[in-house]
Amino acid sequence: MKGDAKVTEYLNKALRHELTAVSQYWLHYRLLDNWGYKDLAKQWRKESMEEMEHADKLVERIIFLDGFPNMQVLDPLHIGQNVKEVLDCDLAAEMSARALYQEAATHCHSVKDYVTRDLFEKLMGDEEHHI
């Protein structure tokens, strides 16, 4: 099914964000574990895996809309050097994702792509949970 070009663009932006988050959260997980924050590290590992699940849903939707998922580009990682910086870096990423997903959901609604809108709203809810 051929989708709206702007919808596919939003899906690929979201995919880039999610793949970046996977890497950033995974590195933070390993750093937190190394610093001795074992329980916090476990949570970050879980968050990284959840971001991978988000990426998978985005890839699936892009392909369904006859687009091509761009998995070759990541945003710069923002890596904390202590626990506070880890929290600050990841909070900024979640806030950025939420804003992107809100904008994308609005566009999807305007072009009557309600399934993709619902996907972005679900992702937005997950990001709000992380915040």
Image: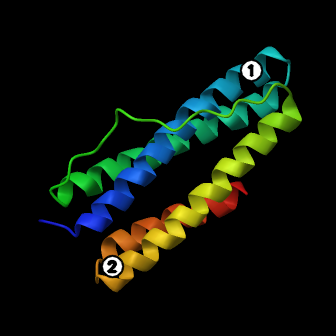
Between discs 2 and 1, the one toward the N terminus:
1
Quadrant occupied by the C terminus: bottom right
Q: Which residue is drawn at 28% across and 57% down?
A: 61
Q: Residues within 10 Å of mark 1 (few under 14, many from 20)?
A: many
92, above or below 46, in the image: below
- Residue on which the image places disc 2: 114
In this orientation, which residue lies closer to the viewer: 66 or 34? 66
Residue 53 placement: quadrant = top left
Q: Residue at x 74, y 20 (%)?
A: 31
44, above or below 50, in the image: above
Residue 107 placement: quadrant = bottom left
Please provide percent x and percent y for residue 125.
59, 66
98 left or right of 71? right
Q: Which amino acid does label 2 sit on?
A: Tyr
Please provide percent x and percent y for residue 123.
51, 61
122 left or right of 26? left
Q: Which amino acid does label 1 sit on?
A: Leu
130, above or below 120, in the image: above
Q: Which residue lies furthest to the top in this view?
A: 34
Please provide percent x and percent y for residue 22.
54, 35
Q: Is mark 2 on a helix, strand or loop?
A: helix
Quadrant occupied by the N terminus: bottom left
Q: What element carries label 1?
A: helix
Q: Residue at x 70, y 28 (%)?
A: 28
- Residue on which the image places disc 1: 31
Q: Distance between the residues labelled 2 and 1?
A: 40 Å
